[in-house]
Image: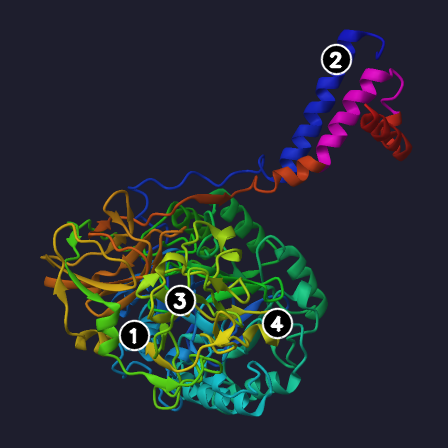
Amino acid sequence: IMKLPALRSILQCIVLLLLMILVLKMSGLLRTSPSDVPTATERFHDVSSDNAPDLYEYYGKDVKTGISTSKRSFTLNGKAIRILSGSLHYFRVHPNLWKDRIRKLRAAGLNTIDTYVPWNLHEPKKDQFDFGTGNDPMSDFLNLAKFIDLVKEEKMFLILRPGPYICAEWEFGGLPSWLLRDPTMKVRSSHPYFLQRAVKYLVKVAALVTQYQFSEKFGVQPIIMVAVENEYGHLKHSDTPYLEAIKNTLLNNGLQMAMLFTADSVARTGEYGVTPGVFQAATGKHRWKAEFDALAVKQPEEPYFLAEYWPGWFDHWGEPFHHVDSVEFTINMVRDILEHEGASINLYMFHGGTNFGFFNGANLLNFGKVYKPTTTSYDYNAPLDENGEYTPKYWALKQLLQQYNKNPEIFVPEPPMSKDTAEFPAVLMNEVLELKYLLEQSKYIASEDVLGNYMESLEWNSGNGQSYGFTYYQLTSRVELESNSRIEFTGRVNDIAYVLVNGNMITKKPNCEDDFSQTPGYWAVEHPTFYPGGLQAQASDIGILVENTGRNNYGYNHQDFEQQKGLGNGSVLLDDQRLTGWNIYPMEFKKDWLDSLKGWRKRLEGQRFSGPVLLKGTFIITTPRDTYLDMNVPGEGSWEKGVVFVNGFNLGRYWRIGPQQCLYIPRPLLREGKNEIVIFELYSPSVRIHFSKKAKFTKLQTESSSSYTWLYLLVALPLLLIVIFNMRFSNKRLTHLVSAGGIFALTKRMFRL
């Protein structure tokens, strides 16, 4: 046959076609796609019968036991249950919107909600606990009991993850910064002081939530599982006394009726993080099968539970894109997981929400050499977007999950109607307060040197140090500068130093992520040096504004959590001479401080200012609605970097470098009538602030079923070429192709050619 050119060509095509089909199948492109996303008229119709029992009616009759396991299955009150869960963090969603978000998760077909409990919000100062009764603008977000009551009202179950460490891309992984005032501190360990404080916090949480356990004692209640620490195995460190202490604190304070569990990427962490007598769950995405295989060895008789499947991902400032997982990719992955021996799943996140205020976390990578702060938006490309709106991913997941609510058939409510977002008219920022006038109204701490004066070590907040925001280091005496003078910092800045000479900013703006490693004043540059150049004067003022852009929330070792902020690990030199005599101003931008500021002056038409500077504007609305502030409108609407406050509430950071370009304003933060916006701009303020109906990102990167096709092509392309060359150069080599020797010989021939 090979001697006949026409037949040989046909055979070549068939072989090539078969190989390409193999490649496409491996990459997932030829997988059966999920059904079309439901149409608008179908979206608010559910297949469950109105007569079907709800979750509490089905599982709550004559409660004798809580959640347990039996031969690869979970049981609740003796009945089999598959946990279909979604993560929803109450502290990332305005409390007036909790009910809406919880109902949307239930309407998707989920039976459980998963939430962390952030220690740093609930104990902002040592021994001052806030579970919704404080006077901070975030206090309303902290009413954990109210949140659990709403979960109960929706007849859903709850997985509680109280830490003390939570990761969650949250500031310091939920740990309070005042812990760092102890120079010997080793967080997430059996360090005596850390353990003492962690236990005290967990006792408070346990006292609040014990009554909400599904059990014979308390009846039908939401809480079925409670986490012991979080991803401890990733530290690759063994500290059994610490994990045992956390476990025993939960058990000894009433949480023995819920199932305790740990969550780790068990295929990678091995025995690290294992706590005797505690159920193990896994976390992951692409490697979920390897995680389940590892669990099968560790827990051969226990059910599979993927405590975190990531249907999207979070963003870091400066990254060139916003992370997106396609609907097809997500549905195929979730389906495969659920079809694996009745596995249970938690989608982290189902609704991401927002890192309001200064509470975004950060990641340390490459053994602490790379620092990446997380954006204000925690949209996560989740099924519900940042403002709680439905996405195509939501409807596709709802359709997929319907089949897992049929046996037994459980009532699923219809999704709530969407609420429109608004694009209000642009606001003129016509009042200004320059930095020097702001400082005149602020308290300071006098010090000989900046060395040792980290944010956390400052005598501030009743002995708790400064937690968040900015710290301004002002040299008290003027200095003479020459044309070639240089200002140098002997340590590393944590995290950004905006150096001001005679009020003029000499820290340059980075334009992309790569610039972070080259721009003096940013975290990556050790011993940064600045050259004032033409800004010299006979008597010059020097000030350094340092921004804490978020403490690390995740680490591979304990050193990753030793992260004090400010200029505390070095001194400031001018032409090799140490500068002494400093006033240090903690700037946390708390509401009462912002409200007290005076001396605002009108901004003249066309008047321009250089940052750092505060600007204020007001606007009037008749009906509060969700909206976004668009920080990057071409022309007069572009802002560089800073923080926005609406009616005294800290919305969070913006940064033109992206990928996030808008700040979300939940409608409960607005009021009928007059509203106020205050912006702290670090570089160059614009004239107006614009609104948008939707979030905007600089660029999207989609992870789909074909995301890894190039990897398969790297393997398959040589095979394709081998076939081509094999058929071209020999009419006797087709059968020889299957031999290793033949492939090796032909590969050598290809390279020679």
The residue located at (68%, 70%) in the rendering is 299
| Pointer 1 residue | 138
Q: Earlier in the sequence, mark 1 or mark 2?
A: 2
Q: Nearer the viewer, mark 2 or mark 4?
A: 2
Q: Mark 3 points at which residue?
A: 481
Q: Which of marks 3 and 4 is in front?
A: 3
First in sequence: mark 3 vs mark 4? 4
Nearer-N-terminus badge (2/3): 2
Q: What element carries label 1?
A: loop
Residues tagged 1 and 3 counted as in contact (Cβ below 8 A): no
Image quarter for residue 743?
top right
> Residue sitting at 55 percent across and 78 percent down?
228
The CA distance from mark 2 to mark 4 is 56 Å
Q: In which quarter of the image is residue 236?
A: bottom right
Per the model, the C-alpha gap separating discs 3 and 4 is: 62 Å
Badge 4: few (under 14), some or many (20 or more) residues near its Cα, within 10 Å?
many
From the viewer's perspective, is 516 left or right of 606? right
Q: Is residue 642 on the magenta stretch?
A: no
Q: What stretch is highlighted in magenta?
A: 715-735
Residue linked to disc 2: 9
Image coordinates for residue 708, horizontal then vertical, percent:
61, 42
Amino acid type, mark 3: Leu
Does the magenta stretch mainly form a helix, a strand or a loop? helix
> Which residue corresponds to mark 4?
280
Alpha-carbon distance for marks 2 and 3? 80 Å
Residue 729 highlighted magenta (yes or no)? yes
* Percent x, y of residue 397: 44, 50
- Tag in front: 1 or 2: 1
